[in-house]
Amino acid sequence: MKVLIKKVKDLTKKEMSFINTNRLKEFGATVEEWQKDYLIADTFLIKDEEDIVAFGMLMPIKIRYLNKNYNILGISSVISVERKKGYGKKIINSMIDYAKPEKKTLIGFCQKHSKKFYEKCKIKLNKPLLKRFLYKNSINKYEDYVIYHEGKDNLMKKLLSTKLNIRLNGPFW
């Protein structure tokens, strides 16, 4: 099965409904709640015939750190409806491949129950760094780890070498 990449704004009503239903089950939130912000996100879909079996999103995010702007891709909503079949790993690998031409850094957040999955995908995890990501001046209390794949900007290396907070002024992904 191959991975199909579509902008959120180009998803069919059926695809959007499926994603929202599964995001609500998994995270307690739907894309519709952030629809305006998510319209520019890329959605990665794996379908078995017509049915979606896994999906995830990459959201273009701007981070300002140490007086420099960084354009990264935020890993969001990686969900495999059919687990233990390699679909989630295929989504993550597709995201990494997608970011390679521009050598973008990928950053996301996950709960501890997802830790082993991301380790299998060769995605790096960092627990202490999570407390330094501030969204609207508060720490994300719902996640346990920062997940990432380093790009050519070496942003993660810079973030890990300092103790300063990282303020997220755009949408939370």
Image (spheres, rainbow, N blue to C red):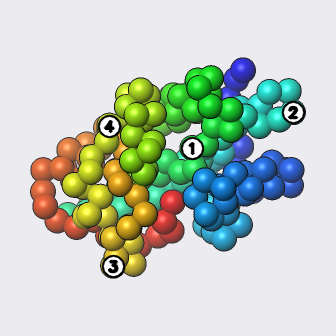
Identify which residue, 115 or 6, lies in the foreground.
115
Q: Tell me what residue is drawn at x 74 percent, y 56 percent.
A: 21
Provide the secondary structure element on which disc 3 rests: loop
Quadrant hosting residue 47: top right
Number of other residues with Cα within 10 Å of mark 2, as a class: few under 14, some 14 to 19, many 20 or more: few
Residue position marked by numbered label 3 in the rendering:
137
Report, in whole angstroms, how far the alpha carbon at label 3 lies from the one at label 2: 42 Å
Residue 108 in view of the camera: no
Is there a contact, CB below 8 Å, between mark 3 and mark 1? no
Provide the secondary structure element on which disc 1 rests: strand
Place of residue 107 in the rendered image (x, y in percent of width and height, measured from the top left): 40, 48
Q: Earlier in the sequence, mark 4 or mark 2?
A: 2
For this view, does 151 lie left or right of residue 76?
A: left
Q: Earlier in the sequence, mark 4 or mark 3?
A: 4
Residue position marked by numbered label 2 in the rendering:
50
**Between tags 3 and 1, which lies in front?**
1
Residue position marked by numbered label 1 in the rendering:
78
Q: Earlier in the sequence, mark 2 or mark 1?
A: 2
Identify which residue, 43 or 142, lies in the foreground.
142
Report, in whole angstroms, how far the alpha carbon at label 4 lies from the one at label 3: 25 Å
Residue position marked by numbered label 4 in the rendering:
124
Q: Amino acid at mark 1?
A: Val
Place of residue 42 in the rendered image (x, y in percent of width and height, measured from the top left): 63, 47
